[in-house]
Amino acid sequence: MEDDCGASSTSPFLTDSLELAMEVEHESSRPAFFSCAFDSQNGGRRFSAESYLASGSLKRVLLRLDPSPNDYEEDTVELFGFQWVTEMALVESCGFLFGLLREQIYRLENLVQMSSSDFGQAAHLHSEAERIRHQCLKFLHYVKVFIFRYLEPPEVENDRVLHPYEELEAQLPSVLVEELHALTVHVGHLCELPSNVLAAFTIPNQAKVFPPSWHLLHLHLDINWLVLEVLHVLGEKLKRQVVYANHFINLTGENLTNISLFEKHSGNLVSDLIRLAINKYTKVRPSEALASSHYSCTCIKELWILLIQLLDHRNKGSNTECFWSLVNTTLRNIFERPSTSESVSGFDTVQCKDPLSFSWWMMNHLAPLYQFDRNGNLDEKVGMPFSEYLRVAGVLEEHLRMHLQCCLTLCSFWDLNLSVVTILWDYYSKNLNSCFTVPWLGLKDLANISKTSLSMLELVKRCCCEQQVPSLYNSSNSYFIFLSILARIMKEENNGVHPWKQIKGRIYSKFHRKRMQELTEVGLQNFFSLFLVLAVLVETEDIVSRVLDLLDFLAPSSITTARRALIWRGHFAFLLIYVEKNMDISALAEKVSNAFREKAKEFLVTKNDHTQRQNLWTLLSTYIDGVQEVFETSCYLSLSEEKLLNDGFTMLLPACRGAELSMVLNFLQVVLARLRSVHERVSQGPQLGNTAPDAQLPLVAKEHHLAVASALWRNFFPYLKSQRMSQTPPSPQLADTAAGFTLLALDIPSKALSDLQPQPVLSMMRLFGWDDMVWPQLVSRYLSHLIENSSLCEAFSSMGYTSYEALTVRSWFRCVLQMFLDQPSGAWAKTDAERTVGKSYMEQLTEMTRLIFKLSEVENILLKANVGQSVFKQDPKNALVQFIKAVGRTYSGLQTLPEKSAMVAKTLEYLGDVLKYVKPYLKAKGPPEGLQLTYWIIGCLVKFCAPILATSKAQQLLFRIVDCLLLPHSVLQQDKELPVALLSAIQESLPLYLQGLSFICCQSQTQGAYLNQLLGSIIRHYFGRFLPSSPAVPGAGQHPLLCSGLLCLPRENYLQFKGHAPPPRLASVLAFILEVLQRTQSTELCDTDLVLPAVLKCLVLVNELQVKKISTDIVQYMVEGCQAGSGGEHATQLTSVFRQFIQDYTAVYDHRVLSILETVAVLDQTLVTSLIPTITQSLKDSEHKQGLGRNAAQREAYKRLLSHLAEAGQNEIQKLENETAQ
């Protein structure tokens, strides 16, 4: 140990002459002392300005300079309140002065007993205690100065008679040794001070007023240190001669010299400090050991540094014990002494719960102190072997972690040696299967098998870099701390020899066939962790080769799925190291990819064995994760990464289900994106001015990119293509991946499959974006990735393919129309999952709509139609309707025939086979939402694009719309009930069709007659279907014919009576007729001829009040309408209808007819007046038929009618009365 210390060194030692030249002879007159009372003016120093380090006191002692060059220069000096002759006081009154010192110490001890909580008293006690301490320190510093200045080495003995003073002077060294010994006995051990004094360590150093106990405690520290300084100065002054305490020896018979006293006192002081540390360690948990210091205040820290500097300084010039040797000896004496040996004073009752851990703790906190120089400034590290403390066998994990934490910390301060690793490896090689857990840490400390190769590598890479050592206790087990120590040693060379050369054999020799077969899953994890650390730091290829050889020792039958997955993760962790070191991975990649191919083949043929599939998927998912991590880590993809994308994926993809397929597709997207990103970066070439060795690497990387692209097209795309028309909606990842392949075809077109050539981008768009047979969910998501891609637009432009945007808009049409395609009929049939899918698709459609409205063609149409850009913020259905309106409005604004013709062609290109899109709804008669959407969107198309549909190019589409949606075979069968959902959809949207068709009928020149026939057929078929059983109540929905604004009266037999029985829904028919009359405010001739006779018949034959009221209102509107009509044609036709009515019903329903005419007379007196001859004749004919003569009652009723007809009526009454008188 002494040799080891002799090899140690502090900061570079300057010669005494140089130090003397640099020394500034201006120092404070106040003597140095221990103080932890820092204030804001301390200037950021680690120690107080008055400390032994910062004040230069220690440096002056070590350099043999005057301890206080500016002090004690007067002839007299005041000590303990007395004046003394400076050059003689210590010679003449040495014992007396030391007695006064002990008296002052006693006075300070009495002040401790008088301590008070009263602030005024406390301030007084502080001042008094500070004064006493200052007097004691002043005296001890005076002793140092006196020895340095005035003490002369003894002369060679001669026979001359000495002067009494000379005799005293010659005895002074011996007396000083005796007095210093007496002083150490008087003050006793630091650790034995009363508890109330030791408690002063905990007083905050920001305080301004300290109790006497604080001053007494720090005075003890001063005395213990100054005794060593005085003894050292004495020895240096006497040129290291031995000074015997003659008087003490004569009295006790014990040997006492200045050297023995120094060694004893320094040993006792170290023992005291260690015992104080033991008392503090009892309160420290192992996990907090590194964060908990062993010194209670900075004064203790300074005292340790002073001891280090002084003891190691003395060790250089003599064979005295160095600091670390003294510490080691003291620790052994405390913890390892036999019970029969002489006990060290004060340590009989020392109790330490874990001496070994305490020793590591002490070393860990003492080692950083070696960085301080004799001025208290940080210096460089030193060396000191500490392997003798590495006892790992039988040590609990909770303690072992702390030991290795300390060991790792010491690596930062001391030079390393291989014996540390040798001892630790010997232990861990035997315990690789251990989890190294601490029970009381709970679940967070359970053995953790890395889930991915990247996490496995990151775990070991943390061992290879600088870490926050205090946090390792909870974050790492002792094995990983050992790996950190190993990594630290691997980074340093020892005399030009790399440590790996020295330790390689020791590590390899521990692994053989039997040992490898004994490893559990945890053992394999630890095995990989060790070799990953080594591969990161040293010979990667050699280490990986050895690992592969060792893994071959494992019997295949004994490798469980979990262990094999771990082995694969280990392989990929090594691959990641290869990638980070820019090494080709082909050999290792082929080995693991071949294993993957075999497992993928097993997965493909395993159909029903769920357990076997699950086990295989564990391995396959491990491979997929590993490959993804390799691609994400590789900088240029130039290291043969394509070897990992073999044909195993062609067998894996068809066998995947649900989440399995989702994982593979997500992986594929990452690889595609990574390849494209790297290829783009490489294609840009090296950065300007880049002269690095790897600047030419991108040129080589392009070849590998072609290989990767080829592997992707060959092994992945065929499956992707086969899934685009699956029976069930595909997963979103399928669209994302297809978009990735499309962009790859754009970047690297040459490697696309032959059936996609010569324009792979166009072929991809036709397959996934523009094919009407592909699921709309896939199309919408696929196109959303590509619409905004400027490179794609440029590619189509360069091809001269102008239909790119139109076909994309057509796909958008289809996606919106088919948004309910995969939903079951009836909202009650939807599950939560289906609602989630529907919501997701709506969000996707909304995004697609936003992108569609940014296409140049669409923007141009919206601009011409004055449609705001906020349209795309609406939901997709409304946005589509707005676009349809914009198309129609844009067409209407065109002037020239070529422009209109081009617009018609473009619109048809936008629409495509629109009826094909909605055919699934019509065939399945649902779901209701799909039917509603179909009829509404296409109805908007018929109404707002009517001018376009009126053209010859678009009429075929119009006829198909009418045939498929409005007049299908089921509608033509009047006796057949239509599904409620279909009928509801038609009813809501029929006005749109009627309005559009009405416009087209007026515009079409070639097919006008046929279109009018169609329109009449539609009205005829749907009038009755949508006629309610009774007149609509206020707020209820109106008949579609009324909503359309196409107001026409029914021309079918809806008012035809069967005998005297009224037709069904008579009140509703009449209400419809009344609504039409009210809206038109005019009466056509045909309406009068067809409707009025039936209404009058209702008034005669039906007694239902509602029918009578509505019929009366109809008669009123028709009579008033005829009055408002121009010319006499209406009046003539009206007269004819009423004349026929009178002739038909007067004979049987004379009173009712007359009552009706009475009502009409109020409306049109002229009309009824013109009917007088007919009424009179009908009355006479009725009487004649009855054969009963004149009917008085009938004639009275007739007279009441005539009374309303002015003069003509009165004349007729007179005629009737004249006939009666005859």
Image: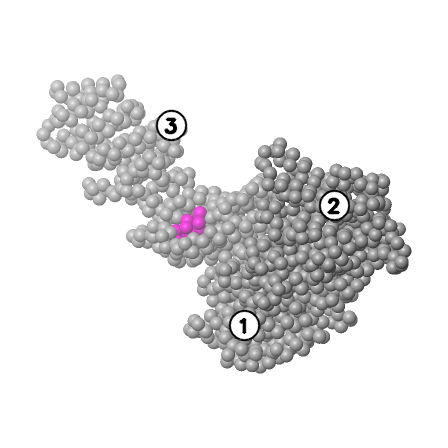
Q: Which residues are magenta?
A: 926-936
The one nearer the camera, 1178 or 860, is 860
**Residues under numbered marks 1 and 3 in contact, where contact means CB atoms less than 8 Å apart:** no
Separation (CA) of disc 1 from disc 3: 109 Å
Q: Secondary structure at mark 1?
A: loop
From the viewer's perspective, is 271 left or right of 695?
A: left
In space, the residues marked 3 and 2 are separated at their CA atoms by: 147 Å
Residue 1038, located in which quarter of the rendered image? top left
| Residue 567 lies in quadrant | bottom right
Q: Which residue is pictured at 75% across the width and 59% down the height?
A: 257
Q: State the residue position of label 3.
A: 1124
- 1054 versus 176 height, above or below: above
**Amino acid carrying mark 1 in the image:** Asn
Residue 399 is situated, as x and y percent measured from the top left of the image, at 57, 63
Q: Residue at x 77, y 70 (%)?
A: 495
Q: Which residue is mark 1?
A: 433
Give residue 187's position: percent from left, percent from top.
66, 50
Local packing at callout 3 (Cα closer than 10 Å; few below 14, some 14-19, many 20+) is: some
- Asked whether, in this view, residue 1153 is left or right of residue 994, the answer is left
